[in-house]
Image (tube, helix red, strand yellow):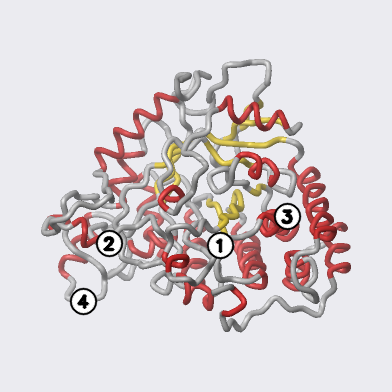
Amino acid sequence: MSRQQFNFTHQPETDQSFENALSKARRGERLTVADGVELMTTGSDQQGIVPKRKEAVLEAANRRRAEQVGEEVTFVANLNNNVTTACNTGCLFCNFKDSSEQFRTSYQDDHSGFTKTPAESQTIVRDALEKGIYEVTSVSGLHPAFALDDEHREILESSERGDINYRPPSEYEKNPGTYCAQMEAIDVGGVHVHSMTPEEAYHAQRGADWGYHEVYSRLQDAGLDSVPGTAAEILVDEVQSVICPGKISTDEWLDAMTAAADVGLPMTSTIMYGHVENEMHRVLHLQRIRELQDRTGNITEFVPLSFVHQETPLYERGMVSAGASNAEDELMIAVARLFLDNIDHIQSSWVKFRNAKGLKLLSCGADDFMGTILSEEITKRAGGEYGEFRSFQDYVDMISAIGRVPVERSTDYQQFRRLDPDDSPYGPALGPQADGTPLLPPV
């Protein structure tokens, strides 16, 4: 089934013209939703993307990027430590999760999922710290045994409700501990802890009436430094009702992110596009991100995540036949740069794309090229093919080759270090135990 066959209320139709929208973008005016749709579609009055118009949008976005952040391309030395694949949410775009029933001690068959104890997470982070990383990112499935902390576990275990997705750790082959215990475990040696999406924060307050402010306050006390704005997918409920009906609503996501900002936590923002949504949905999503930034000012970057369709339920059930096209990926980056006038940094994901395409997107308005990612399971499980690790040498070679300046950054974009192409070998220097040594020895 193609996107056009879904009976959505929101359609990519406007009374604006492409030429007017492009003129506003070139002048640096704040764009309306109609403007964004015209740029994203290259004109809603015709079918298909018009190459000449697309190139005009990309040119305007690249010029805006140069004016806003210059010629630097940033990246961070980081580790992904996903704690568990156990999850019962049932999102149709995801092949990362495994049914939590497979993790119970009563389950007899083998499965490919994993759960890490807090002690195991700490060992992984300590080893990566010695290699020089700055950041550990931890995003996980919603394991039924997860609780926010010991007080939350007491509430869950005394509850008589049958709708809170909780089972005690004793019923599982391995105990993930609590969210706060995981934060405390990975908050070692001065590393930056980037964790707890709004969806995880919702899971961390189920059965209690604390609210997101209390959840993020406790997590911050346990070591949380910033919040990944994933689990947003498309911030339009009619799309979420198709691809992830079991997840939190748009308003819940925005409430959680607002609470994280109120606590004082920096945060990223994302979109996951190229599945059942249309261009109007994408721009409405951008509008909600822009409004959130207007209210909070805490968003450090915007990360477009192109849907990897292989081996996902959406593809297997025939609801989609492919992900976004190359032109759609380019326009997503470009329109994000032009529309999100209050967010400085737009990321190109080398995990989602091959190197050449990732570099191409840096000329469409993006200025950040992700991080080293010593481990990355989510995209790989969905059928991604483009690697799990990026060395500093890779970064310097690729970024220099397109005439841009390679720059190591901190997660919050407060620390920067330019890398001179003549100063090989290259390694991180911003991490708390970094001394410029390459992350991994040469093969």
- Asked if residue 251 can be seen in this view, the reply is no
Q: CA distance from mark 4 to mark 3?
A: 47 Å
Left or right: 219, with 349 as reference point: left
Q: Quadrant of residue 213?
A: bottom left
Nearer the observer, 321 or 75 = 321
Which circle's residue, 1 or 3, is located before the other in the chain? 1
Residue 120 picture location, percent across and down: 26, 38
Query: Residue 322, which numbered label?
Result: 1
The residue that appears at 67% across and 69% down in the rendered structure is 279
Estimate how packed mark 2 is, as few (under 14), some (14 to 19) or many (20 or more) residues with alpha carbons within 10 Å.
some
> Which mark is nearer the camera, 3 or 2?
2
The kind of secondary structure element at disc 1 is: loop
The residue that appears at 79% across and 58% down in the rendered structure is 54
Residue type pointed to by label 4: Arg
Q: Which residue is mark 4?
A: 161
Whether residue 41 is situated above or below residue 15 in the rendered picture: above
Which circle's residue, 3 or 2, is located before the other in the chain? 2
Q: CA distance from mark 1 to mark 2?
A: 25 Å
Whether residue 391 is situated above or below residue 211 in the rendered picture: above
Nearer the observer, 271 or 434 = 271
The kind of secondary structure element at disc 4 is: loop
Left or right: 175, with 251 as reference point: left
Residue type pointed to by label 2: Ser
Q: Which residue is mark 3?
A: 334
Q: CA distance from mark 2 to mark 4?
A: 21 Å
> Which mark is nearer the camera, 1 or 3?
1
Which circle's residue, 1 or 2, is located before the other in the chain? 2
Q: CA distance from mark 3 to mark 2?
A: 37 Å
Q: Which residue is mark 2?
A: 99
The kind of secondary structure element at disc 2 is: loop
